[in-house]
Image: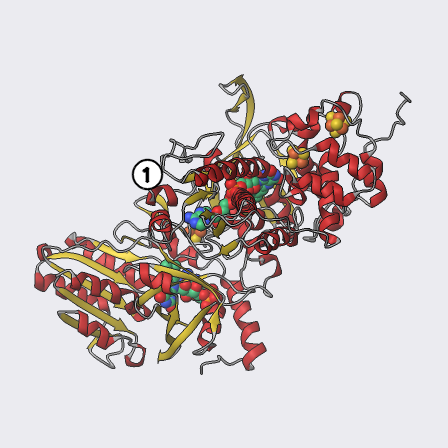
Amino acid sequence: MAPREKTPRQPMPEQEPKVRARNFDEVPLGYSHETAIKEAKRCLQCKKPKCRQGCPVEVLIPQFIGKIAEGDFAGAAKTLKEKNSLPAVCGRVCPQETQCEELCILGKKEEPVAIGRLERFAADWERNEGKVEIPELAPATGKKVAVIGAGPAGLTVAGDLIKMGHEVTIFEALHKPGGVLVYGIPEFRLPKAIVQAEVEYLKSMGVKIQVNAVIGKTRTLQELMEEDGFDAVFVGSGAGLPTFMGIDGENLNGVYSANEYLTRSNLMKAYLFPEYDTPVARGKRVATLGGGNVAMDSARTALRLGAEASICVYRRGREEMPARSEEIHHAEEEGVQLNLLTNPIRIIGDEMGRVSGMECIQMELGEPDDSGRRRPQPIKGSEFVLEVDTVVIAIGNSPNPLIPATTPAIETSKWGTIIADEETGKTTMEGVYAGGDVVTGAATVILAMGAGRKAATAIDEYLKGK
Amino acid sequence: MFEIVSKEKLGPAVFRMDIAAPDIARKHQAGNFIMLRINEEGERIPLTVADKDAEKGTVTLVFQAVGKTSAELAELCEGDSLLDFVGPLGKPTHIEKFNGVVVCVGGGIGVAPVHPIACALKDIGNRVISIIGARSKELLIMEEEMKATSDELIVCTDDGSYGKQGFVTEALDEVIRREGKENVALVVAIGPVPMMRFCAKTTEPYGVHTEVSLNPIMVDATGMCGACRVTVGGETKFACVDGPEFDGHKVDFDELTKRLAMYKESEARAMKIYEEASHGGKRCWE
Ligand SMILES: Cc1cc2nc3c(=O)[nH]c(=O)nc-3n(C[C@H](O)[C@H](O)[C@H](O)COP(=O)(O)OP(=O)(O)OC[C@H]3O[C@@H](n4cnc5c(N)ncnc54)[C@H](O)[C@@H]3O)c2cc1C
Ligand SMILES: Cc1cc2nc3c(=O)[nH]c(=O)nc-3n(C[C@H](O)[C@H](O)[C@H](O)COP(=O)(O)OP(=O)(O)OC[C@H]3O[C@@H](n4cnc5c(N)ncnc54)[C@H](O)[C@@H]3O)c2cc1C
Ligand code: SF4
Ligand code: SF4
Ligand code: FES
């Protein structure tokens, strides 16, 4: 075999950190055709591709990359969609460094193939060229399925089931479909037009989407099945309940859950206030608590809303931060300060009830805990006050109890997650399936989609037997 | 889209609207509220459902124009539509047949949300005494409706321009003393925050259970954001899903008042821009 010409991993052009930290436009600008082909050619087309084992939905990675290398972008997009219905989203938000790219064989000696960037490229090309094809739908089965929640899990289930010939209606509590993709993840990381295009694609296949429908309130799950004639239900209601710290001062003005801060900014477009009616605090010194993607999104949003200092406070070290490495890197480039091994003790307010500071304590890593991670412990006497006017709490989310509380036949775990079979999504209630964050607790887009895909197959089986 | 089927002006800056929303009309119970958004740029705001007609598929809102969104709503007419309308939200009022009288107190615009509760309590066989009040006569709303659903109705105005002169709290105190505190099973008080606070203060020495309906700022109203946090009995609650009704003796009203002022500057700015752009500085309904 001829020795392979060594090409380095192709960098992604990005907006300048100083510029982008003040606007809401997308940060990475995407590969050009030439760069994409160049990067695709790095792939060794392994016979037993390791990379696929790292992808929760087993995208046909070498195959789609091979098509890009040949310049067949339409073919690449088609190949991607065989396994992944939202490639434009996943290419942008998957934690590739711990999934597909971590196992890429090239990563052993040099840098792994930029699978995520190539995935994004192919999907963007298809959308921008208007080349999205509507697949052939199976003959109508006459069966009706209700999908609760229009996040990645629900959208995937809906797309799969409509292709199988079932009638599908999505019920979404908010006024826009997309779940976390529209209310949580900011525009600068995932442009909302992409989510909108995916939703339009589903609609064009015949999926009905009813927004402003809170299941458990507007209709109950039982009513959907008993009165409205749905033969099966998929619950993909996510993990939308914010966790607070339980420390003093948490209800002061200027303290937000990340959900509120991001919902105001993204879904309600508060960054365009007063053109849009919803306001959000434009803090000068903003502290974000937590070290995950949600914290990075909040801290970066704070800068774009005009903060002079955006400080991320995390109780463990950098290595332990659960955020995608690209997000941490982008955040630091933009000027987010990482205050690691630091834990807040209380939030301090002024006489008007507004945040004026936050008392923190320094931490050190002690013995490993059950999870093998070294447990952070406070260092006595190391308390200090951080001067801030806004605090965003991004320490986690758990499932909203509304659906289980109004559907007694659905059993939940002690964490409030719905108990469902891992392979099928089957819950303890006949004809009801569940998947995504509502089953796993807050996880990732691709896992939610994978769960949706499995549930769609199981629901199809179930409906055939009915 | 959700059509405005009828609109009526009840007083200065107070309006009543019937909205076509059959799903909500079918499921609504006393104490529930809805969230609405007028248009794509709009804010989501909560309003209590003051009445419903399940047959016609409509729900009734009674609201006061206090800021940009409610002013914009006040400007809409019969035949116009709202972009988003979601509900019924919140826990419904706990309704039971009590051994003893129930007192329903409504202050200002608060009479509207008290009305369906008074009806539900009355329908199940309670003796209902209602006290409604306003700053002055022209601000008083829904007197006839409240009269129809109450065994006794007491009307107060702050300035004495109609009914008894004085605050609803004074009338409330009199009723409890007259009936005997053991014989008052429940007080429901809805209105401006200070009025609810003082109603709770009035009943506290008598140990009469008092429900108040809190109105913190909300965003999603499904329990997803925590904007609506209130402290009740030392615990943080989300008013949109745990309430909006709570035991008035346990509510931290100071905190609620402060939290309601969170966006004062933005609100004033939005209102000013709105008035100047569309009405040369005047409010549309004036
Ligand atoms: C700020 C933020 C950043 C993130 N960044 C990343 C990232 O970079 N990469 C990554 O892989 N993952 C990321 N995640 C996680 C990822 O977004 C979630 O794991 C994923 O969205 C879960 O999908 P889902 O379909 O299960 O639920 P969701 O996306 O939460 O969607 C659930 C939907 O159900 C609706 N719903 C809830 N209750 C009801 C009801 N009773 N009736 C009707 N509808 C209801 C909700 O309104 C929502 O629209 C991030 C999460 C957040 C919050
Ligand atoms: C559960 C619930 C039920 C409600 N029911 C009714 C109702 O039936 N009729 C009605 O007229 N109003 C009701 N409200 C209050 C109503 O939601 C507010 O008046 C409205 O959101 C104001 O929006 P705006 O843009 O017009 O004014 P803004 O410009 O947002 O505010 C103007 C002023 O109103 C105050 N305000 C802002 N938001 C609220 C709020 N949520 N509650 C009280 N005051 C507020 C502010 O302190 C500010 O000074 C209810 C509120 C809640 C939470
Ligand atoms: S879906 Fe995610 S994990 Fe799978 S190949 Fe694409 S970027 Fe990698
Ligand atoms: S492991 Fe890497 S080199 Fe091999 S097929 Fe996958 S992406 Fe290509
Ligand atoms: S308004 Fe968002 S949780 Fe109550």
Quadrant of the rendered image containing residue A341 = top right
Q: Position of residue A217 (x, y in %)?
A: 36, 53
Chain of the residue under the numbered disc 1 shown in the image:
A
Q: Position of residue B147 (x, y in %)?
A: 18, 74
Q: Is residue A93 above or below residue B169?
A: above
Quadrant position of ligand 2: bottom left
Disc 1 is placed on an element classified as loop
Task: Inspect this view and state whether residue B48 appears.
Answer: yes
A262 to the left or right of A49: left
- Indicate the quadrant containing the C terminus of chain B: top left, top right, bottom left or bottom right: bottom left
* Amino acid type assigned to the residue bearing label 1 in the image: Ala
Residue drawn at 75 percent across, 42 percent down: A75
Q: Is residue A157 above or below residue A324?
A: below
Quadrant of the rendered image containing residue A430 = top left
Q: Position of residue A87 (x, y in %)?
A: 66, 42
B199 to the left or right of A89: left
Task: Inspect this view and state whether residue A395 appears.
Answer: no
Residue drawn at 47 percent across, 61 percent down: B44
A364 and A411: which one is in front? A411
**Label 1, on which residue?**
A409
Residue drawn at 29 percent across, 60 percent down: B196
A223 and A273: which one is in front? A223
Seen from this angle, which residue lies furthest top?
A: A367
| Colour setup of the view | secondary structure
